[in-house]
Amino acid sequence: MKTPRLQYYDLGEGVTAFSTTRQGGYSQGNYGEFNINRYCGDSEEAIRQNRASLCQVLGIEDHRLLMPHQVHLTEMTVVDEAFLRLSSDEVQQRMEGVDAVMTNVLGVCIGVSTADCIPVLLYDGKHRASCAIHAGWRGTVKRIVEKAVAKMTEVYGSRPADILAQIGPGIHLESFEVGDEVFEAFAQEGFPMEAISRKYPITGVAAESDEQEKWHIDLPECNRLQLVTSGVSANQITVSPVCTFLQSESFFSARRLGINSGRIFTGILLR
């Protein structure tokens, strides 16, 4: 059996936190090699084999590896012991249209799927609770990270000051060119535009226009600022240096490879 190559994060004792890379799996072409996302067109057999190898590395059964079907909104699911007793069809229903998952159950790996969007992992060591968040630009504008911290406070009694956060691999400022409508969406929601945006020369073939520059948005910084605003200490937030667009040989990038390509899985497992 092939072994997936993982990038691990240090979120404390008794926690396994990681992002998958493209290496060490069974998928082919733009899905190669390691993909477990069932919603991007990869073969079911490759996904099954990849899930099996990841579960072997993590030491868990397949039904304890959980990933939602994300839709760029702010719905969240809480995984508890009752959730784990649901049928596979019921689990799928509960994970439909969800962009953040949280749990305090040991031996369950929750995670999100990305390929340029920003994955965020949260861990509250005092209450032994975790959360995995998918923050694309739409979810970021809707402040999904702030809402997830608030939800952990509601469900587990978490104090933001006790939370450790890992912002995983995603597209970075220099590569994330956006239209004026995206810039305006962030501005209208009160984001500090001087801190999270910058104009760069247009890349690629420009349309018939005299415009020479376009806005870029710093998605990792947008989400870091939301964590700080929520009360998470800045020194307890780690930001991955990986830009998926620039490092697409190791991490999936939809902008580089197209939407019919694999996805990174960023997960957290409490032991």
Image (spheres, rainbow, N blue to C red):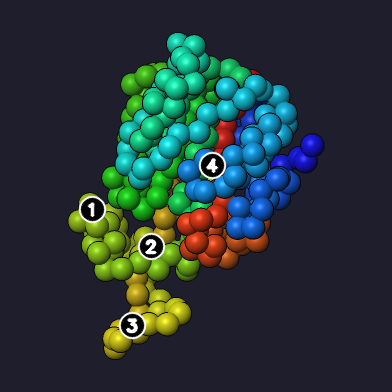
Residue 145 x %, y %? 38, 40
- Could you tell me how far apart the alpha carbons at marks 1 and 4 are, in whole angstroms? 33 Å
Q: Dot 1, crowdedness within 10 Å: few (<14), some or many (≥20)?
A: few
Q: Dot 4, crowdedness within 10 Å: few (<14), some or many (≥20)?
A: many
Task: Spot the residue most to the right.
Answer: 1
- Could you tell me how far apart the alpha carbons at marks 1 and 2 are, in whole angstroms? 14 Å
Horizontal side of residue 186 vs 91, given as left or right: left
Residue type beneath disc 4: Asn
- For label 3, the residue is 207
Secondary structure found at label 3: loop
- For label 4, the residue is 37
Residue type beneath disc 2: Ile
Q: Quadrant of the N terminus?
A: top right
Dot label at residue 190 = 1
Looking at the picture, tell me which residue is in the foreground, 60 or 238.
Answer: 60
Looking at the picture, tell me which residue is in the foreground, 102 or 57.
Answer: 57
Q: Earlier in the sequence, mark 3 or mark 2?
A: 3
Residue type beneath disc 1: Gly
- For label 2, the residue is 217
- Could you tell me how far apart the alpha carbons at marks 3 and 1 are, in whole angstroms? 30 Å
Residue 31 x %, y %? 61, 52
- Could you tell me how far apart the alpha carbons at marks 4 and 3 are, in whole angstroms? 34 Å
Residue at left 41%, top 40%? 70
Residue at left 42%, top 20%? 90
Q: Earlier in the sequence, mark 4 or mark 2?
A: 4
Horizontal side of residue 90 vs 104, given as left or right: left
Q: Dot 3, crowdedness within 10 Å: few (<14), some or many (≥20)?
A: few
